[in-house]
Image (cartoon, helix red, strand yellow):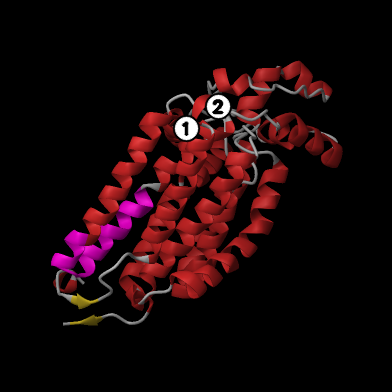
Amino acid sequence: MALNLFKKIEAPSGLFAVEKINLLYNLFTSILIFILFDRMGHPGSMLADRFLIVLMTFGMMLLYRVYPCKMTTLIRIAVQMALLSYWYPDTFEFNRLFPNLDYIFAGTEQHLFGCQPAALFCLKFPNKWVSECFNLGYFSYYPMIITVGIAFFIKRFDLFEKWSFIVSMSFFVYYIIFIFVPVAGPQFYYPAIGAEDVAAGIFPALGSYFDYNCTLFPGSELGHGFFHHLVVASQTVGERPTAAFPSSHVAVSTILMILAGKIHRNLVCFLLPFYILLCGATVYIQAHYLTDAIVGFVTSFFVFFLSQWAYRKWFVTPISCEWRER
């Protein structure tokens, strides 16, 4: 493969579909910033970031025109995928302006299951190795994205850009939900209301509490192993009291499993244990309510087909066909 990375290919000279969907999300959130300008904490820097992202996107496109090859394609798409880690915490800057809804979701959980599965799951399995397995699964989220992406790049380069579009659009669908459905999740909500209220099934509304209090208290303290520390470290850096409903971890990992099936069933078999552990970990480490995980799984199929349809209807480019080396 290395010999072909820098061999020129015939490819579209304009924006890739994954860049278009990123720019559309950029535009959508920029409009929101202008609408909510007086209520936001630092709208000026947020708009400046978005302008820099636009410049970088078109700069990468111009650089690609100079030498279109697999390597410059990889770099160009990798940049757009990396931006997802910027857009995720960015959702908090919007939903912190709306009243928190955790009390509704915790109450629904109590009504459906008669308890709080996120509070009890880790207590039912108070074992360091169980904790480590679930934390390994949770930490596997981004490695799963990278693994499936590399598989498409190597095995199905003709579908590599389509893969990146489907994954990116899936994230953006859930990011838009996160903006308008402000749910922080158990690891933020439970410590805020106290263990006694959680045990008693009392779930008070917190209003704008998380606009001023966004300290993370990791849920499971049962095992301070290697992967536990990795998860805590990653959450400390990028986690915010946002994005609990529905679980994008469950949803996007389910979509990744569907996409992995397009490559080879061996890839599905390899990823399956990590996928199962990841889905369980969302509740085990108290990142999500059980209903978040269930809704994430159910909606993932709709979002997957919506992304495929949108790609064919509005975003398809010649890159979706077999690229020819010059």
In depth, the one of 106 and 198 nearer the eye is 106
For disc 1, the marked residue is: 235
- Residue 54 in the image: state x and y as whole percent: 32, 49
Check if residue 63 falls in the magenta segment: yes
Residue located 62% across and 40% down the image: 180
How many marks overall? 2
In the image, residue 13 sits, relative to residue 206, either above or below, namely below
In the image, residue 42 sits, relative to residue 31, either above or below, namely above
For disc 2, the marked residue is: 218
N-term mark: 1 or 2? 2
Residue located 36% across and 42% down the image: 50
Q: Label 2 amino acid? A: Pro
Q: Label 1 amino acid? A: Gln
Quick one: label 1, few (<14), some, or many (20+) residues within 10 Å?
Answer: some
* Image side of residue 143 versus residue 294, left or right: left
Residue 99, quarter of the rendered image: top right
Q: Given contact means CB atoms under 8 Å apart, are the residues at marks 1 and 2 in contact?
A: yes
How far separated are the C-alphas under marks 1 and 2? 8 Å
**Which span of residues is magenta-colored?**
62-82
Assign the N terminus to one quadrant of the image. bottom left
Check if residue 172 falls in the magenta segment: no
* Image side of residue 115 versus residue 228, left or right: right
* Image side of residue 6 versus residue 316, left or right: left
- Residue 313 in the image: state x and y as whole percent: 51, 74
- Residue 215 in the image: state x and y as whole percent: 53, 20
Residue located 57% across and 22% down the image: 211
Assign the C terminus to one quadrant of the image. bottom left
